[in-house]
């Protein structure tokens, strides 16, 4: 379980998130739905946030199916709009420490990468 942090704790900006995920094999960032940034691997989304948002904006990402109910029952997390059935959550500002958030985004990347065709997975080795 995660502890709610003071609102002065900032989570990653879009630029920091791009810097982090941009080092992983096959990651692309583009704009969808006019105002959202989407981080993808192999053309499949693993993270979403409003393009014009600061570090305090909600961040949506995929989580392991077995953690979905646990996380959505934790303060600061909610089922992600339109994507909850695919086990996506939305984390609100200061809900988790930055290191934990980085790990969760990496897990999301790994979950999505694992569903890509085997040939593409082999091409995306760290």
Image (cartoon, grey):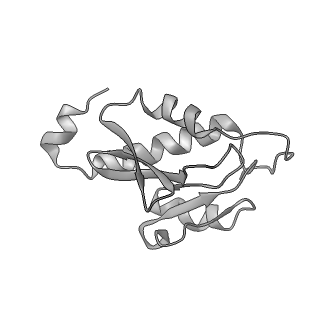
Q: Residue at x 64, y 34 (%)?
A: 99
Relative horizontal placement of residue 97, taking residue 51 as reference (left or right):
right
- Outermost residue toward the front in this view: 34
Q: Residue at x 38, y 50 (%)?
A: 111
Give the x, y percent position of residue 14. Answer: 57, 40
Q: How many marks?
A: 0
Residue closer to the observer: 71 or 22: 22
Relative horizontal placement of residue 63, taking residue 121 as reference (left or right):
right
Relative horizontal placement of residue 19, taking residue 6 as reference (left or right):
left
Looking at the image, residue 102 lies above or below residue 60: above
Q: Residue at x 42, y 67 (%)?
A: 86
Give the x, y percent position of residue 27. Answer: 35, 37
Which quadrant of the figure has residue 60? bottom right
Looking at the image, residue 66 lies above or below residue 20: below
Q: Residue at x 85, y 41 (%)?
A: 8
Give the x, y percent position of residue 126. Answer: 32, 26
Residue closer to the observer: 120 or 59: 59
Which quadrant of the figure has residue 80? bottom right
Give the x, y percent position of residue 42. Answer: 26, 45
């Amino acid at each position: 379980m995660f502890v709610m942090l003071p609102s002065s704790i900032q989570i990653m900006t879009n630029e920091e998130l791009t810097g982090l995920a941009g080092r992983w094999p096959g990651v692309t960032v583009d704009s969808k739905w006019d105002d959202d940034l989407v981080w993808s691997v192999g053309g499949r989304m693993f993270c979403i946030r409003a393009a014009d948002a600061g570090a305090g904006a909600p961040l949506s990402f995929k989580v392991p199916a077995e953690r979905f109910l646990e996380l959505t029952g934790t303060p600061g997390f909610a089922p992600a709009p339109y994507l909850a059935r695919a086990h996506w959550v939305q984390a609100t500002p200061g809900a988790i420490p930055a290191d934990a958030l980085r790990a969760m985004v990496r897990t999301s990347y790994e979950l999505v990468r694992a569903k890509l065709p085997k040939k593409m997975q082999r091409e995306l080795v760290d």
